[in-house]
Image (spheres, rainbow, N blue to C red):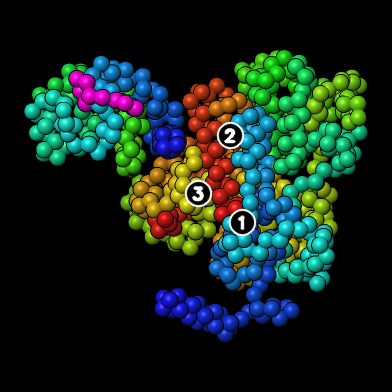
């Protein structure tokens, strides 16, 4: 059940990228993970081998799995506060020796950004830390932060937002539950406005959302953001 | 105990202050009364939103004969073996708990002068505003040889529930290599892609349970919703199983014999094992009884869904004649919110915002092969007019089609939560 929920969430979050709709997937990530399998296990019953098992890698402190022979520099990085999240994992996987100079991970790195995102999506499937989802979302959303500051500064009318939001609730549940379409409650105003403008400008690829956002004015988007911000 | 008393006193202060300045309606009652007839995507949504958003300032009564509502949308997925019938059933318990007076009865008449609705049980319910969302009924003799008394032999299965189960049972008892025939409806009808999703889902069931069976569709139309996408899917998943006979090839020249289980298409008679007759449609009977229909449906004003015939009677969903929106659960739900906002505004003075409408129809061609079409709409003086739209493309990746199907499951959960609380 949990896996399904995560899968559905991520499938939808993938739409948050500025790339083609079908580009990121757990199954593509699984294929890329084959490069890692000689040293790392993941999933049910995964054990440490040459490298640590990768269940719940998100939120884990670098060099933090007992019983694994890490390089000194990896342990030190952890002691200095390196925690695995989308940014740090992406950087490490892109070029391991650039982030941890003397890492024992003898992997030349994944230079292709899409490959890394697919792989991270696959890894996140095995992490129960809920924040990873938010992280992934921010990770892909950062590309789209080009909304005019005057638009961001509009103060929305939450009463109008409530009316407009009724249209969203045909699909996005007011309880915030995700049964295949993500909950959008309690989003930060700025994130909400940026996301909606990214749909409106067709930077985010989802056709229903492009259509819905496409006919909303800047004030209406601000009104929706003002309403959803306080909805729990 | 102390806390309870304090809360109790708090509430009575509020109640007293409300009573201090009552709005008095025509016959002297203090609270405005809205009656909603029909507890589907339009009616349940309207009742719930008016009750919820008015915060107790409006008495809302929902009249709906069924105690469990079985959605017509997604019923094809039950036929296809993708969903169970229990997945489609919803009770009115949460709507009632939310403050709506839910009456399980048939509305059998509307007196526009005394502003009352009469019920089959003999009682009557007064209203200040009446919202009709009765869905569809079938036009007698629209298909030669078929009338409502034939619906057991040749089900329409175009209202959710027992008819859907009947059709499923008939499909399951088809002999190996048997024939399923569909008589498709003429425009305008409920759920434009519905008959073709049904063909897909029946084929899906047969593919795995009765692979030599055949499907014949007699269609009075030359083309249909999402045609390219459906036909692409039929060729891909069910090659050779489905024969679609359009009006160009006599598909509209049809008669049926429910006793002999025969269908005659353009003069050629075939013996079939299942015959799914989806006749031409009209507004649910109560709209006609209320005197708000013109022809088969009820013309409405796009800004608030009030009828052209009577400013205090509104019609939502399939029964309305509103312009460009397709007759769908999504459309009815969208119209209900515009209507709820307007009705609440006119009864309590709350702010009325401009009408915005939208619709998306997802269809399943095969397990995990979902497609969709959608549009947004606005109110003009003449009608609900289309603003913008999109449709799935042919040749999409299997991954995207799966994501589309999963999205439709999310939508189903979303809209049913929106309707029933």
Q: Is residue A25 left or right of residue B406?
A: left
* Residue B353 showing in the rendered view: yes
In-front residue for pair B68/A23: B68
- Disc 3 crowd, CA 10 A, few/some/many (<14, 14-19, 20+): many
Quadrant location of residue B107? Answer: bottom right
Task: Say what secondary structure mark 3 lies in.
Answer: loop
User: Mark on residue A181?
Assistant: none
Contact (CB < 8 A) between labels 1 and 3?
no
What segment carries the magenta color? A42-52
Place of residue A28 in the rendered image (x, y in percent of width and height, measured from the top left): 38, 22
The vertical placement of B134 against B350, above or below, is: above
For the N terminus of chain A, the quadrant is top left
* Residue underneath mark 2: B372
Instruction: Look at discs 3 and 2 and give the one toward the viewer.
Output: 3
Q: Earlier along the polypeptide chain: callout 2 or callout 1?
A: 1
Name the chain under label 2: B
3 and 2 marks in contact (CB < 8 Å): no
Instruction: Tell me where residue B227 appears, x and y as whole percent.
Output: 67, 27
Q: Which residue is mark 1?
A: B93
In screen coordinates, is A156 left or right of A131? Answer: right
Which residue lies under the disc numbered 3? A173
Say if labels 3 and 2 share a chain: no
């Amino acid at each position: 059940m949990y896996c399904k929920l995560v899968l559905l969430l991520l499938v939808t979050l993938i739409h948050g990228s500025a790339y083609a709709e079908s580009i990121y997937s757990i199954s593509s990530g699984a294929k890329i993970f084959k490069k890692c399998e000689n040293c790392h296990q993941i999933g049910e019953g995964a054990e440490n081998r040459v490298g640590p098992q990768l269940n719940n890698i998100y939120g884990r402190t670098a060099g933090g799995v007992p019983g694994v022979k890490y390089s000194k520099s990896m342990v030190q990085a952890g002691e200095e506060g390196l925690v695995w999240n989308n940014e740090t994992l992406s950087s490490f996987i892109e070029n391991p020796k650039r982030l941890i100079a003397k890492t024992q991970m003898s992997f030349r790195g994944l230079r292709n950004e899409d490959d890394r995102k697919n792989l991270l999506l696959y890894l996140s499937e095995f992490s129960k830390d809920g924040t990873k989802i938010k992280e992934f979302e921010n990770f892909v959303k950062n590309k789209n932060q080009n909304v005019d500051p005057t638009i961001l500064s509009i103060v929305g009318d939450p009463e109008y937002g409530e009316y407009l939001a009724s249209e969203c609730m045909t699909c996005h549940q007011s309880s915030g539950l995700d049964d295949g379409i993500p909950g959008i409650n309690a989003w930060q105003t700025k994130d909400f406005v940026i996301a909606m403008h990214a749909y409106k400008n067709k930077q985010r690829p989802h056709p229903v959302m492009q259509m819905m956002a496409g006919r909303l004015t800047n004030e209406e988007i601000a009104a929706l953001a003002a309403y959803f911000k306080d909805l729990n | 105990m102390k806390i309870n008393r304090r809360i109790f006193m708090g509430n009575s202060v509020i109640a007293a202050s409300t009573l201090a300045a009552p709005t008095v309606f025509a016959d002297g009652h203090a609270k405005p009364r809205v009656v909603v007839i029909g507890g589907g995507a339009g009616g349940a949504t309207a009742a719930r939103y008016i009750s919820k958003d008015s915060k107790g300032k409006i008495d809302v009564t929902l009249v709906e004969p069924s105690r469990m509502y079985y959605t017509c949308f997604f019923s094809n997925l039950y036929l296809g073996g993708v969903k169970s019938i229990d997945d489609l059933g919803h009770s009115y318990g949460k709507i009632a708990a939310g403050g709506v007076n839910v009456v399980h009865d048939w509305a059998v008449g509307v007196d526009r002068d005394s502003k009352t609705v009469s019920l089959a049980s003999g009682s009557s319910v007064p209203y200040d505003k009446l919202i009709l969302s009765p869905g569809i009924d079938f036009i007698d003799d629209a298909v030669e040889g078929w009338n409502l008394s034939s619906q057991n032999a040749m089900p329409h299965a175009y209202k959710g529930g027992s008819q859907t189960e009947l059709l499923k049972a008939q499909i399951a008892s088809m002999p190996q290599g048997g024939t399923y025939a569909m008589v498709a409806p003429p425009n305008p009808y409920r759920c434009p892609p519905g008959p073709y999703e049904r063909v897909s889902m029946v084929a899906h069931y047969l593919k795995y349970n009765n692979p030599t069976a055949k499907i014949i569709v007699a269609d009075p139309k030359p083309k249909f919703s999402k045609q390219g996408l459906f036909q692409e899917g039929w060729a891909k998943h069910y090659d050779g199983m489905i024969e679609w006979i359009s009006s160009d090839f006599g598909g509209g020249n049809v008669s049926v014999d429910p006793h002999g289980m025969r269908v005659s298409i353009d003069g050629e008679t075939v013996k079939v094992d299942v015959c799914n007759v989806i006749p031409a449609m009209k507004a649910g009977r109560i709209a006609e009884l209320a005197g708000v229909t013109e022809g088969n449906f009820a013309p409405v004003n796009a800004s608030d869904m009030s009828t052209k015939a009577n400013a205090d009677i509104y019609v939502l969903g399939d029964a309305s004649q509103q312009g460009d929106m397709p007759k769908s659960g999504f459309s009815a739900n969208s119209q209900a919110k515009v209507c709820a906002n307007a009705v609440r505004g006119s009864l309590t003075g709350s702010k009325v915002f401009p009408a915005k409408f939208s619709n998306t129809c997802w269809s399943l061609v095969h397990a995990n092969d979902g497609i969709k079409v959608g549009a947004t709409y606005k109110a003009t003086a003449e009608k609900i007019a289309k603003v913008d739209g999109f449709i799935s493309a042919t040749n999409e990746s299997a991954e995207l089609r799966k994501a589309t199907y999963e999205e439709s499951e999310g939508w189903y959960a979303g809209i049913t939560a929106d309707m029933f609380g």
